[in-house]
Image (spheres, rainbow, N blue to C red):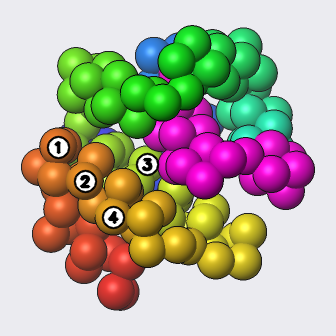
């Protein structure tokens, strides 16, 4: 397999991968309600990925039924075909984005770890976060 730096891998994402990444990031950011700073970070990410449509899709997905959005997102993400390394990269990027906004709550960290467990990449994510 050809190795691409993370920045190149993100630039090469297809529409489904962009939807999955932005849903993942959105669902974690909206765990306690979305504030203006978090919305700006999501919009910045969508702009960098040329994925404004995918961000709108992710936010509509969550708004459909906010109370069960996390569980629906888990179900959706479990069915998306994404390489293991990319799953780890997506989760790590979301972890780092939470730190960019200034903090990561215990509930957000647990939610990210729960998604990592769903994707069977929990130990790899923990290693990368610690690294």
Alpha carbon of mark 4 to alpha carbon of mark 3: how far? 16 Å
The reply to whether callout 4 and callout 1 are in contact (CB within 8 Å) is no
What residue lies at 17% left-to-right and 43% top-to-bottom? 118
Q: Could you classify mark 4 by the number of other residues whose Cα lies within 10 Å: few (under 14), some (14-19), or many (20 or more)?
A: few
What residue lies at 34% left-to-right and 44% top-to-bottom? 86
Q: Disc 2 marks which residue? A: 114
Q: Provide the secondary structure element on which disc 2 rests.
A: helix
Which quarter of the picture shows residue 123?
A: bottom left
Q: Disc 3 marks which residue? A: 90
Seen from the viewer's position, the closer of residues 120 and 83 is 120
The reply to whether callout 2 and callout 4 are in contact (CB within 8 Å) is yes
Q: Provide the secondary structure element on which disc 4 rests.
A: helix
- Decide if residue 70 is in sight here: yes
- Decide if residue 12 is in sight here: no
Q: Disc 4 marks which residue? A: 110
The reply to whether callout 2 and callout 3 are in contact (CB within 8 Å) is no
What's the magenta region?
Answer: 18-40
Q: Earlier in the sequence, mark 4 or mark 1?
A: 4
Q: Provide the secondary structure element on which disc 1 rests.
A: helix
Q: Provide the secondary structure element on which disc 3 rests.
A: helix
Instruction: Give how far across and how far down residue 13 sits, in percent.
Output: 51, 28
Q: Could you classify mark 1 by the number of other residues whose Cα lies within 10 Å: few (under 14), some (14-19), or many (20 or more)?
A: some
Q: Earlier in the sequence, mark 3 or mark 1?
A: 3
């Amino acid at each position: 397999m050809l190795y691409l730096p993370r920045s190149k891998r993100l630039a090469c994402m297809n529409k489904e991968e962009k939807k999955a990444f932005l849903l993942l990031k959105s669902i974690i950011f909206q765990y306690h309600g979305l504030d203006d700073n978090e919305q700006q970070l999501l919009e910045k990410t969508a702009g960098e990925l040329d994925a404004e449509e995918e961000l709108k899709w992710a936010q509509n997905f969550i708004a459909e039924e906010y109370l069960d959005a996390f569980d629906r997102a888990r179900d959706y993400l479990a069915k998306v075909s994404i390489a293991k390394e990319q799953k780890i990269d997506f989760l790590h990027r979301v972890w780092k984005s939470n730190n960019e906004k200034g903090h990561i709550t215990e509930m957000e960290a647990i939610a990210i770890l729960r998604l990592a467990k769903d994707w069977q990449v929990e130990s790899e994510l923990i290693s990368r976060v610690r690294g």
